[in-house]
Amino acid sequence: MPSPKVHRCNCPLCQQDADNPYKEQHRLINLFLTCLDRDQRRWYVAMESKRAGFGGDGLISQITGACRASISRGRKELNEFLAFGSISRVRPFLSGRPKIEEKDPTVKAALEQMLADEIGGDPMSQQKWVRSSVRQLSRKLRESGHQIGHCTVLRLLKEMGFSMRANKKKIKVRLDGPERDEQFEYIAFQRKIFNDAGLPIISVDTKKKELIGNFQRSGRAWSKQAEEVNTHDFPSLAVCRAVPYGIYDVTKNLGYVFVGTSTDSPKFAVDAIARWWKHEKHAVYTGVSQLLILADGGGSNGCRVRGWKQQIQERLCDELGLTVTVCHYPTGCSKWNPVEHRLFSHISINWAGKPLRSLETMLWYIRGTSTRTGLKVKAFLQEDIYKEGQKVTKAEMDRLDIQHHTVCPKWNYTISPRLDIDTF
């Protein structure tokens, strides 16, 4: 059988002296108080104070936590009961002042009228909110002749169904119409073709840029003492700004992160992919000439970025002899990109609450990321300097050997090596 719950005495006297001989008596007094209502507690502590004699109010106040005013009031009520056989005005006195609605019946209607232009909410539920603060509302009510404080306004708002609420991301917005579902089915189709043929499939994206320095990071980490960081995250105090570009090998469950220190440009993204291919070609993909890339619809590897397609043509297709098929996820669907939930999420967990004071520290945390499913991550520093705003002309785009697919052509295309690249 489970042991009975022990009611411990938490009064200051017993806390200061663990060997207090009256500890058991104090425990029983507090235990008995939990069985009484408000009036009975007041009378009981008054009786205990009277029995304790001189200084009883202070002693019982320490033991039970009751204020001296309540003990004194309980003593007066007991004396009245002994003298007259009853206690007068106990309940009326405890009831307090009448509510503002009883004194001013029009105040609630005035508040509702004032909130007519302030209310927002969901028409399909009971959830509502207001823009003005309770102090502003109480000031407006006083200006209109109602004597009311902000605490009373807060109580009225709660009774009317209002409360402080934050925004909640719950509404799913479907972007790009019916092509969204069609694109997901086509991506699954392409993945099956490449997977059955044993061809490489990679998912790519740029992770959130990080300031390198003694800055605070969200999350918590096990430590005996919290690390002290700068009070402000000014970019001028940073060593540099790191740009991590992630490549996740879908079939091998391997992650690669190339950390740059300049800009997130299409050339930086494709250089990272080219470096990954040179690093893994002889070890994993010997004799392979086709590659499937899964990318988001925006960013440096977006479906409308001309530089992205030009760099794939020059760096991957012409130089490395690869035939590259690219499938972009629809707008607003980056969460379905495997690199997000299979690689980036685990990296974020691994360095949560830990300042990234140097690039070496950042690379160390990335390389230390692993999962029970066998994920392994490699990290490299990309020290080249990349420029922003590199424009690609229409004439240069016309020279690309690019073939758009019949299914969602803006999101799916294949770029092949140019046989007569010397002419370009």
Image: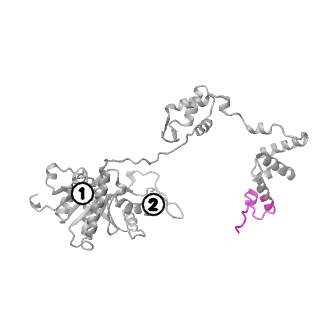
Q: Position of residue 17 (x, y in %)?
A: 75, 62
Quarter occupied by residue 92 = top right
Q: Nearer the viewer, residue 103 or 134?
A: 103
Amino acid at dot 2: Ala
Q: How is the image coloured?
A: one colour
Please rate how many residues cluster around mark 2, counting C-alpha atoms within 10 Å: few if below 14, some from 14 to 19, many from 20. Answer: some
Q: CA distance from mark 1 to mark 2?
A: 30 Å
Residue at the spot x=85%, y=53% of the render?
52
**Relative to residue 303, is residue 12 drawn left or right?**
right
Residue furthest left in the image: 423
Considering depth in this image, is 381 or 322 the residue closer to the camera?
Answer: 322
Q: Quadrant of the C terminus?
A: bottom left
Residue 207 seen in the figure:
no
Magenta region, residue range: 1-27
Q: Which residue is mark 1?
A: 267
For residue 7: magenta?
Answer: yes
Indicate the position of residue 28 as horizontal and vertical percent values.
Answer: 79, 58
Q: Say the numbered circle drawn on residue 352.
A: 2
Q: Position of residue 398 (x, y in %)?
A: 14, 52
Please give left or right for residue 242 compared with residue 274 in the image.
right
Left or right of 237 in this view: 112: right
Question: How many C-alpha atoms fall within 10 Å of the one at disc 1: few (<14), some, or many (≥20)?
Answer: many
SS category of the residue bearing label 1? helix
